[in-house]
Every structure is written in C-alpha cells, then in structure tokens.
Image: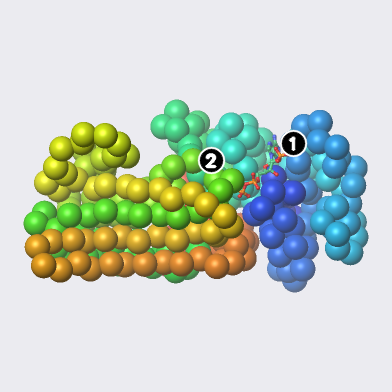
Amino acid sequence: MSKPGVVVAGAMGRMGRMLVKLVSSSDQVTLVGALVRPGSELIGQDAGTAMGGPALGVALTDDAVEAMARAQALIDFTTPEVTVQLATLSAQARAVHVIGTTGLSDTDLLRLRAAARHAPIIRAGNMSLGVNLLVGLTRKVAVALGTDWDIEIVESHHRMKVDAPSGTALMLGEAAAEGRGEPFGDLRTPARDGMTGPRSRGSIGFSSIRGGDVVGEHDVIFATEGERVILRHLASDRAIFARGALRAAIWGQDKPPGEYDMTDVLGL
Ligand SMILES: NC(=O)C1=CN([C@@H]2O[C@H](COP(=O)(O)OP(=O)(O)OC[C@H]3O[C@@H](n4cnc5c(N)ncnc54)[C@H](OP(=O)(O)O)[C@@H]3O)[C@@H](O)[C@H]2O)C=CC1
Ligand SMILES: O=C(O)C1=N[C@H](C(=O)O)C[C@H](O)C1
C-alpha cells in the first residue's frame, strides 16, 4: 500500500518548518504539499530550499484545493480563521485533519464539528506526550484534593504568541474542572487586574507570561493552607509537538469520521 500523502499548512511558520522537515524525512508518509499564506512572496519556492536546506521537490503554494487533491492528511498549525477554512477542504477530500492551532472560538469549534461528520479531525492544544500525561495527572489530583485546595495554572511562552491563556493551559483547566465534577465555564476565572477581591472558592485561575523564545512551560498549582502541590511540564523543543502531530496523522488513516484528540492517538 502506498504511503499516506501529507500536506503541511503554515509551512514556513515556527511549527510548519518543523513539520516540513519531519514529514519529508519520514519513511511512513510522503510530503505532498506545503501551504503558505495567499500572496506570500515564497510561493513557487521549494519548501526545503526556502528554509536554507536541501530541495524537497515540493513547491510552496497557496492553492489549498489543488494540494488537498493529493492528500490523505493535513497537518495544520496556523490561525483559527485558516483552520476553519481548511476543515471544509479537508472534509471534502476525506483527509485526516490534524489541528494544533489554538485560540479557536466556540463558533470555530462548531464549524470543526460539522466538518468532522465527513472525515476524522484530531485536535489538541498540545500534541506532546508529556502534556497529555499531565492532563490525566491534573484530573486525578483535582479529584483527590477538595475545594480547600485552590487551583492556579501558570503558562509561559515566547513573545510572538498571540493567544492567551494557551491551549495547553485551557486543556489543563478543563481536566481540573472535570476532576472537580464542575463545568469548566463555571470555574474559569478571567485574568486578574486591579481590585479583584479575594479569590472565589473552587475557581481556577490563569496567568500568562510572554517573553523571549520560551517554547512552552505550564504549571498546575494546587495550593492550600501550609502546602502546595505543583505539576509542571517544560517544553524545550518544538519537535515534541511535530512528532505528536505526525503520529496523529498516521493513526487517523483508518479511523471513521469524527472528533478525536491526542488521548485517543496515544491510548491514554
Ligand atoms: N497543539 C500544539 O501542540 C501546538 C500548537 N501551536 C499553535 O499552532 C499555531 C501556530 O503556531 P506557530 O507555528 O508558532 O505560529 P506561526 O505564526 O509561526 O505560524 C503560522 C503560519 O501560518 C501561516 N499562514 C497564515 N495564513 C495562512 C494561510 N491562509 N494558509 C497557509 N498558511 C497561513 C503564517 O504565514 P505568515 O507568517 O506569512 O502570515 C505562518 O507562517 C498557534 O495557534 C499555536 O498556539 C504551536 C505549537 C504547538
Ligand atoms: O504558540 C505556541 O508556541 C504553543 N502553543 C500551544 C498552546 O497554546 O498551548 C502549545 C505549546 O505550548 C506551544
């Protein structure tokens, strides 16, 4: 059987470059397309040489329809607007859509749900094994510790990140709320600024730090009188996200249409 063809969207972005390298060097899939922003001056250049590496024989393009005609999977770390548009094309092509994009609105998520009626969508705010393990641990600790323990999530990222709290922080917050047996929307506290008053019992707080080239750091802090438990994940290489995304694209090949996440892919 021939190897699944993979298109990488946002191919010259921080994650896209990682993915182009990983997919093109994989012996399990073939890189068949590399999408860039419409009108980009990079269109037509080879995806490899555009990064200063060897030629890969795949030209950068903004023609998503043409690229998806050759694809069995699309790996997409772009923006919410682009991801929603690509979900329609991916569904039409019956290709697995692996989504790493964060900052999606509730309306965006409904559109993805509609697309997932036609092809598998695998989406996670963090594709790394470590964070997906941490999600399970967070749920367990939240079950074990009652509402006397305050939950705060602190995340740090590079200066170019545009959304907050991070997708990972929201995954961790949702897991903590599940552990508490409460809807996440009821426990999530907006970012603090000014005369906020004391924290409300049982709430889940978020703090976001932006600076330099931090790849991604997340702490889940459980704090009570006299002690704290801190669960931590530190990412120092974006390759962990790229490897997870490629694994998802391969895993999704024989799956029926529907919505999946990395716990499905990793069997957690
Ligand atoms: N789930 C996970 O494990 C991870 C998720 N992420 C998320 O992935 C997303 C991307 O992150 P990152 O790579 O750092 O961001 P970048 O801004 O570096 O990359 C996004 C890329 O998408 C390109 N782009 C914009 N519009 C289009 C379009 N219409 N078609 C194709 N490409 C387009 C941009 O091009 P241009 O610059 O020319 O506009 C840019 O190169 C973010 O939401 C981030 O939070 C990141 C890491 C891990
Ligand atoms: O934008 C990033 O860089 C990252 N985004 C994801 C998130 O929002 O959690 C995952 C990772 O932390 C890097």
Query: Relative to 86, does residue 14 appear above or below in the rendering?
Result: below
Give the quadrant of residue 220. bottom left
Say left or right for 62 vs 144: right
The disc at residue 229 is none
Is residue 56 visible from the viewing direction of this image? Answer: no
**Residue 180 pos. (x, y %):** 17, 53
What residue is drawn where x is 14% and y is 48%?
202
Say left or right for 229 vs 25: left
Out of 233 and 184, give the one closest to the viewer.
233
Q: Nearer the viewer, mark 1 or mark 2?
A: 2
Please state, as top left, top right, bottom left or bottom right, where the N terminus lies in the image: bottom right
Say which amino acid is labelled 1. Answer: Arg
Say which label, 1 or 2, has the lower sequence index. Answer: 1
The residue singled out by tag 1 in the image is 37
Q: Which residue occupies the extreme front position in the image? A: 194
Q: Residues within 10 Å of mark 1 (few under 14, many from 20)?
A: some
Out of 190 and 96, give the one closest to the viewer.
190
SS at mark 1? loop
* Mark 2 sits near ligand 1, with its Cβ under 8 Å away: yes
**Residue 134 pos. (x, y %):** 36, 65
* Mark 1 sits near ligand 1, with its Cβ under 8 Å away: yes
Say left or right for 14 vs 223: right
The disc at residue 162 is 2
Is residue 82 visible from the viewing direction of this image? Answer: yes
Marks 1 and 2, how far apart at CA: 17 Å
Q: Which residue occupies the extreme bottom position in the image? A: 27
**Residue 122 pos. (x, y %):** 52, 51
What residue is drawn where x is 21% and y is 42%?
187
What residue is drawn where x is 77% and y is 68%?
25
Q: How crowded is mark 2: few (under 14 residues within 10 Å), some or many (20 or more)?
A: few
SS at mark 2? loop
